[in-house]
């Protein structure tokens, strides 16, 4: 009997031959990790017609997203970079941008805006020149791409002389109108602050701990948005613009657009403290775009190891599939840094938990950190060591069918440079070009 065929007997004694569709666990490309880099790499692989799977353990940095992607923003915490591509040419040769080549990075990143728009994520900006966004604490911070619905500006003088209404939602605590008003006053913006209420949120207000951005976004849809718009109009009539917390539109941007249509003056959003509603939307939009292209997304599963022989990964294993292996021609590891659990630190060592890949982290734990809390921390620059094609190494030998991307890589300090998403997207697109050749 065909092993994929089972005979089942139903209560009325009729014999039924049921053909079970065994899941075929062979792919062209398997992506390990479903954050920004894994999703973008997976999308490009699936778009090229390759049979692609993404195995994704859990939360990614996107769930904490500021609403802006950074390419190269800071020399250090004080000096801001205006022209990031020019500055990238002077980075160390081991930096991911230099390894790809800055002009190649620029060409690869040309694909980002259209890709995000295809997924329904509307951002704007240019690699030629950074713009600014307003942080939740009222600082102006440079950025490469920012969501269309956010407050961003090319130069701080652009907002001079405007009058803004900073409108919070009554009893929501993760948004700070006074910090924003202070920050905006330094840009010569006159601010009024107000809070508004809509009855649809009363159910959450029974416990203040429920008044979180992601919870509110689930109630702020349809007529609740129209009610909110009416309230916002009431408190902002003598202003040029309205600034609000980014708590609308967790599944798509329709509530954002609806509010903007209902309010009589331009409405802009500012990030709240995490979790980030636009970040969750971005993650879901990329995931849905990937699956719409035929990709297989395996949420809540963790790759726990693999078999490597003759310099190639032959199969990998996950917690959910146990002893059933997943097999592919190429693998891309996009498991993030310490935050995503792509790197683990214990008392003795820092290690990469899936394959035990080589890292640039020293054994001596006292070298991992600077005692000055505000200094740039060495551990932020740790990650996997790769060849020039971003293929990681194990015990000094390159693994030929494995590529590493994003926050897992070594050679940069995303926090110090303000370069997290740029490196993530450039290396994801670079890996995608290698696995779809
Ligand atoms: C909290 C935070 C906020 C940030 N905000 C910004 C920002 O606003 N703008 C910006 O430019 N940069 C930001 N960054 C920098 C950020 O690192 C990059 O922008 C980028 O999102 C990193 O993406 P990634 O896919 O490489 O890693 P991650 O986003 O960390 O994703 C890794 C994914 O892999 C999964 N994973 C881990 N191990 C396994 C396994 N064994 N099997 C299967 N899946 C696994 C994790 O669960 C996670 O989903 C932020 C970083 C952090 C930590």
Image: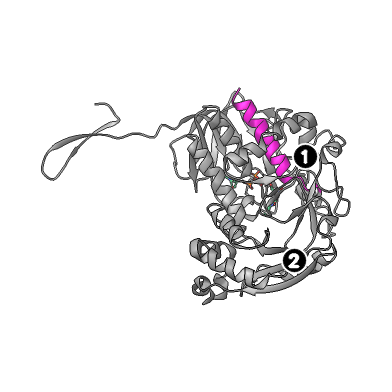
Of marks 1 and 2, the one in the foreground: 2
Considering the numbered disc 1 on the image, is that residue within a helix, a strand or a loop? Answer: loop
Left or right: residue 170 compared with residue 107: left
Please tell me which residue lies in front, 112 or 390. 112
Q: Quadrant of residue 236?
A: bottom right
Please tell me which residue lies in front, 290 or 348. 290
Determine if the magenta segment contains residue 231: no
Quadrant (top left/top right/bottom left/bottom right) for the N terminus: top left
Left or right: residue 148 compared with residue 287: right
Q: Which mark is residue 164?
A: 2
Left or right: residue 154 compared with residue 118: right
Q: Residue furthest bottom?
A: 206
Q: Residue furthest left?
A: 12
Q: Which residue is mark 1?
A: 127
Q: Which mark is residue 321?
A: none
Considering the numbered disc 2 on the image, is that residue within a helix, a strand or a loop? Answer: strand
- The percent position of residue 310, horizontal first and vertical second, equals 59, 23
The residue segment tinted magenta is 417-437
């Amino acid at each position: 009997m065909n092993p994929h065929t089972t005979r089942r007997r139903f209560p009325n004694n009729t014999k039924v031959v049921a053909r079970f569709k065994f899941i075929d666990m062979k792919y062209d490309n398997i992506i390990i990790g479903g954050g920004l880099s894994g999703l973008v790499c997976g999308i490009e692989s699936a778009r090229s017609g390759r049979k692609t799977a993404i195995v994704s353990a859990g939360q990614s940095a996107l769930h904490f997203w500021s609403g802006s992607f950074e390419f190269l923003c800071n020399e250090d915490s004080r000096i801001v970079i205006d022209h990031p591509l020019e500055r990238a040419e002077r980075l160390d040769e081991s930096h991911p941008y230099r390894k790809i080549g800055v002009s190649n990075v620029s060409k690869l990143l040309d694909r980002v805006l259209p890709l995000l728009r295809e997924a329904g994520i509307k951002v704007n900006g240019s690699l030629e020149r950074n713009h600014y966004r307003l942080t939740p604490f009222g600082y102006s911070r440079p950025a490469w791409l920012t969501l269309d619905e956010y407050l961003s500006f090319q130069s701080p003088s652009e907002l001079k002389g405007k009058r803004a209404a900073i409108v919070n939602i009554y009893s929501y605590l993760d948004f700070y109108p006074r910090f924003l008003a202070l920050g905006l006053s330094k840009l010569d913006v006159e601010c009024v602050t107000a809070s508004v209420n809509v009855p649809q949120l009363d159910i959450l207000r029974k416990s203040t701990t429920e008044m979180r951005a992601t919870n509110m976004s689930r109630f702020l849809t349809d007529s609740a948005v129209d009610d909110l718009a009416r309230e916002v109009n009431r408190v902002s009539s003598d202003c040029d613009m309205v600034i609000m917390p980014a708590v609308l539109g967790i599944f798509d941007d329709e509530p954002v657009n609806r509010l903007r249509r209902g309010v009589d003056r331009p409405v802009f959003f500012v990030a709240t403290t995490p979790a980030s509603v636009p970040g969750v939307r971005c993650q879901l939009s990329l995931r849905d775009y990937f699956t719409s292209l035929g990709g297989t997304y395996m949420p809540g599963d963790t790759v726990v190891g693999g078999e490597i022989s003759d310099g190639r990964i032959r199969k990998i294993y996950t917690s959910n599939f146990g002893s059933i292996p997943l097999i592919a021609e190429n693998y891309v590891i996009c498991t993030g840094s310490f935050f995503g659990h792509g790197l683990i630190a214990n008392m003795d060592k820092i290690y990469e938990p899936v394959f035990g890949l080589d890292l640039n982290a020293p054994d001596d734990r006292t070298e991992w950190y600077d005692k000055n809390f505000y200094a740039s921390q060495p551990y932020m620059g740790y990650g996997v060591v790769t060849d020039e094609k971003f293929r990681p190494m194990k015990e000094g030998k390159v693994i030929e069918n494995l590529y590493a991307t994003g926050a897992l890589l070594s050679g940069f300090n995303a926090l110090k440079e303000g370069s997290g998403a740029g490196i993530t997207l450039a290396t994801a697109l670079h890996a995608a070009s290698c696995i779809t050749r």
